[in-house]
Image: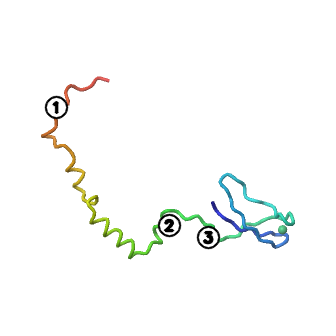
Amino acid sequence: MPLYNYDCTGCESVSEVLIRRGHDEPSTCKDCGGDLKRRLSTFATPQSELDKIRTIDPAYKRMVEDHMARTPEAEPMRHLNRLTPFSAAEDPGDPIDF
Ligand SMILES: [Zn+2]
């Protein structure tokens, strides 16, 4: 949930408001009834998963990727080796008539 700061254009007060999904933003000051203007704040900007990944230290990312490459799951032939070869497959019989 984003947290926004609002400046009142009437009395100069600043209010911090947590905006819940589906709820409207406040439009009037609770102190004087004046109009509110949302202040731009860096921490209120929602960060996407991609943005988070981009902020990861490149050295750490390389270490994780190196480790992942050495796991058995990284072996591409592992899936093919589990499949039954055509030569060993049984005759599936007549086609099913839907
Ligand atoms: Zn006000």
Q: Which amino acid does label 2 sit on?
A: Asp
97, above or below 65, in the image: above
Instruction: Give the CA distance from mark 1 to mark 3.
Output: 63 Å
Quarter-of-image position of residue 5: bottom right
Residue 61 is situated, as x and y percent measured from the top left of the image, at 39, 71
- Determine the image quadrant of residue 78: bottom left
**Image vertical order of residue 93 relative to residue 37, above or below:** above
Q: Which amino acid does label 1 sit on?
A: Asp
Query: Which secondary structure, mark 3?
Result: loop
The image shows residue 37, relative to residue 90, as above or below, that is below
For the residue carrying disc 1, how many other residues have a C-alpha within 10 Å: few (<14), some (14-19), or many (20+)?
Answer: few
Q: Which of marks 3 and 2 is nearer the N terminus?
A: 3
Q: Which residue is drawn at 85% across and 69% down?
A: 10
Are dots 1 and 2 in contact, CB under 8 Å?
no
| Front residue of this view, candidates 34 and 62 | 62
Residue at the spot x=20%, y=30% of the render? 92
- For marks 1 and 2, give the CA distance: 52 Å
N-terminal of the two: label 1 or label 2? 2
| Residue type for callout 3 | Phe
Where does label 2 land, which residue?
51
Label disc, if present, on residue 91 of the rendered structure? 1
